[in-house]
Amino acid sequence: LEHSALDTKDTLTVLAQVDWSSDSSDGILLHALHVEEGDVFTTFDPPILIAEPQAKPEDVQTTVTGGYTFTATFDAIEGCGTLWAPDWEDEDCIVVTLADGDEDPVTNGYIVGTYWLVPSWGAALMELDGYPAQWTLAQAVWNK
């Protein structure tokens, strides 16, 4: 998942990349974070468990990794339409909140917050602690 910003001159700047995976064996995992500013790369070993396979609302997962205790809470299932895919308003999106336990919005600001995840795609919407507004999926590219 790549975080980028578009300025008033239509210049796209990559801010960070987050490596995710999801499958029916391991569930949803967050593996690594690369922040462009300062070229900081963090690998989470073990990866942060966002949701177990076959998870349900109210499930809570705790992962100690990277010097933090991350807590992922499966909040709800609801629609998550975006400008890019407005028909996702009718999808059963997984709403998950990820916290790192330190209450500082700058720390892990590219990953801590609330996500709306489309099971067949990944992140559609994000309200991250490090940003003042909701981020929305603008483009999808599949890498095999």
Image (cartoon, grey):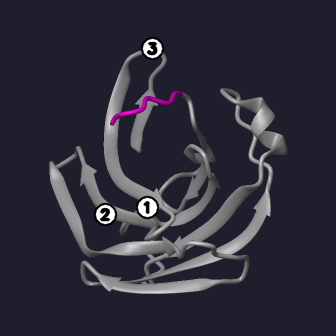
Q: Which residue is mark 2?
A: 31
Residue 5 left/right relative to 35: right
**Boundaries of the magenta span:** 139-144
Q: Is residue 4 in view?
A: yes
Return the disc, 2 or 1, that comes first in the chain's sequence: 2
**Among all residues in the image, which is located at the extreme right?**
90
Residue 74, percent from left and from top: 65, 74
* Dot 3: element: loop
Indicate whether 70 appears above or below 33: below
Residue 30, percent from left and from top: 38, 64
Q: Amino acid at mark 2?
A: His
Residue 131: numbered disc: none
- Give the crowd class for mark 3: few <14, some 14-19, many >=20 residues within 10 Å: few
* Dot 1: element: loop
Q: Amino acid at mark 1?
A: Ile
- Give the crowd class for mark 1: few <14, some 14-19, many >=20 residues within 10 Å: many
Report the label total.
3
Q: Amino acid at mark 3?
A: Asp
Do callouts 1 and 3 mark residues in contact (Cβ within 8 Å)? no
Mark 1–mark 3 distance (CA, rounded to whole Å): 25 Å
Return the disc, 2 or 3, that comes first in the chain's sequence: 3
Mark 1 or mark 3, whichever is nearer to me: 1
Q: Which residue is mark 3?
A: 10
Q: Which residue is mark 1?
A: 111
Chief secondary structure of the magenta span? loop
> Residue 114 in magenta?
no
Identified at 41% across, 44% down, the residue is 1
Q: Is residue 110 in view?
A: no
Residue 112, percent from left and from top: 48, 66
